[in-house]
Image (cartoon, rainbow, N blue to C red):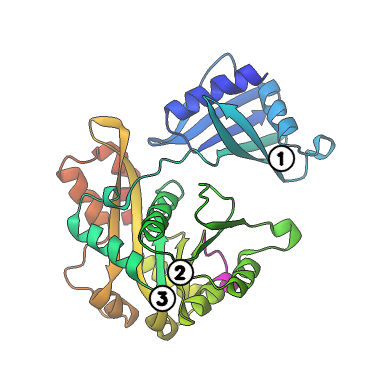
């Protein structure tokens, strides 16, 4: 059965997948991977329900209580590299859904490679020199937020002696230069509790994997207000929507005006003509335009993420088909 798993991983990693999705109906198994081209179904004689049950076993799930939502982890050596995995299980109405996340196979890139726009590169470098404030990345799942966050932390670690601490669910890229701590909500170790514990260890830079609730948002704000540099992410389509989302989570615009340094919305695409290479499209809201947005003033000559995507299509950087779903979202 392990050979079948290795064959599945070969197929998934060839598509630069971060997640493998399983759906079981009776004895039928459907497998999809989330890679550079979005969700894509894969077919192979090696894929059957037996493999799905094997994943539950090696992830140490409670096989006698499969009706309960569960999550487990395991390590496996594949292609000469030790990989870490998280397998999550959900059962509903005769159907089982599983997601296998590949945690430490992200493509790491340098800060200078994040954007082809020199002005945006200047913004990224400026953020790494800040000693207090808050930078928020936004975008859907698979938009490259983790890659951007770690490129920023990597640049800080290379250029300074700053103490960097990260709080993640789960830890997706391991780096010995940072203090990395994983969320464990089953044991009460939430993002908010993790931040509270971090403050006792005198960090300079704090990376919070995701702001999900009002308590975490408030703790992140307090960290930035007390002289720490905070990097985090939030689920929102655009930078302006991310600002509204922070408000919904309880941070007033007055509070944000004291701590928020920048909001960056992003999307990740395959480079046109080079499907194995990726390009990230960024929208950056900072400076005067951020001040205007916080004051609910109109943004003059502002280029949001949808404008940036259209521009990338027009400049033959990405395929129009790849951007179709994002541009459709603009009209909804």
Look at 80% across and 39% down and name the residue there: 62
Is residue 162 in the magenta section? no
> Would you name the residue on which mark 2 appears?
230
Check the image and name the residue furthest to the bottom. 254
SS class, disc 3: loop
Q: Residue furthest right?
A: 64
Q: Is residue 205 above or below residue 54?
A: below
Residues in magenta, as a range: 210-216
What residue is rendered at 61% in x and 38% in y?
A: 85
Percent coordinates x, y for residue 181 in the rendering: 61, 57
164 up-or-down from 80: above or below: below
Please identify the quadrant where the C terminus is shown.
Answer: bottom left
- How far, Cα to Cα, is label 1 from label 3? 44 Å
User: Mark on residue 132?
Assistant: 3
- Which residue in the structure is indicated by mark 1? 91
Q: Nearer the viewer, residue 86 or 226?
A: 226
Q: Is residue 153 left or right of residue 321?
A: right
**Disc number at residue 7?**
none
Label 3 vs 2, first from the N-terminus: 3
Q: At which x and y percent is residue 231?
A: 44, 65
SS for callout 2: strand
């Amino acid at each position: 059965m392990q050979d079948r798993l290795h064959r599945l991983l070969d197929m998934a990693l060839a598509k630069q997948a971060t997640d493998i999705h399983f759906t079981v109906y009776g004895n039928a198994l459907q497998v999809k991977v989330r890679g550079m081209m979005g969700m894509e179904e894969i077919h192979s004689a090696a894929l059957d329900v037996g493999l799905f049950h094997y994943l539950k076993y090696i992830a140490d799930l409670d096989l006698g209580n499969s009706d309960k939502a569960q999550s487990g982890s395991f390590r496996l050596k594949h292609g000469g590299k030790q990989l870490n995995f998280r397998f999550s299980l959900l059962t509903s109405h005769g159907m089982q859904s599983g997601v296998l996340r590949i945690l430490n196979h992200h493509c790491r890139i340098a800060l200078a490679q994040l954007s082809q726009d020199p002005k945006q590169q200047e913004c990224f470098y400026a953020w790494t020199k800040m000693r207090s404030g808050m930078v928020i990345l936004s975008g859907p799942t698979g938009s490259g937020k983790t890659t951007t966050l770690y490129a920023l932390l990597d640049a800080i670690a290379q250029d300074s002696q700053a103490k960097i601490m990260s709080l993640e669910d789960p830890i997706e890229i391991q780096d010995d230069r940072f203090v990395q701590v994983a969320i464990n909500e089953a044991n009460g170790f939430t993002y908010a509790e993790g931040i509270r514990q971090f403050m006792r260890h005198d960090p300079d830079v704090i990376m919070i994997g995701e702001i999900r609730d009002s308590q975490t948002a408030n703790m992140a704000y307090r960290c930035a207000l007390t002289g720490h540099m905070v990097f985090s992410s939030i689920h929102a389509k655009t930078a302006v929507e991310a600002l509204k989302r922070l408000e919904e989570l309880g941070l007033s615009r007055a509070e944000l005006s004291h701590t928020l340094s920048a909001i960056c919305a992003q999307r990740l695409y395959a480079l046109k003509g080079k499907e194995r290479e990726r390009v990230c499209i960024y929208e950056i809201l900072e400076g005067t335009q951020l001040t205007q947005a916080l004051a609910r003033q109109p943004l003059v000559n502002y280029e949001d993420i949808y404008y940036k995507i259209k521009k990338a299509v027009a400049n033959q950087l990405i395929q129009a088909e790849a951007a179709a779903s994002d541009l459709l979202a603009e009209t909804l």
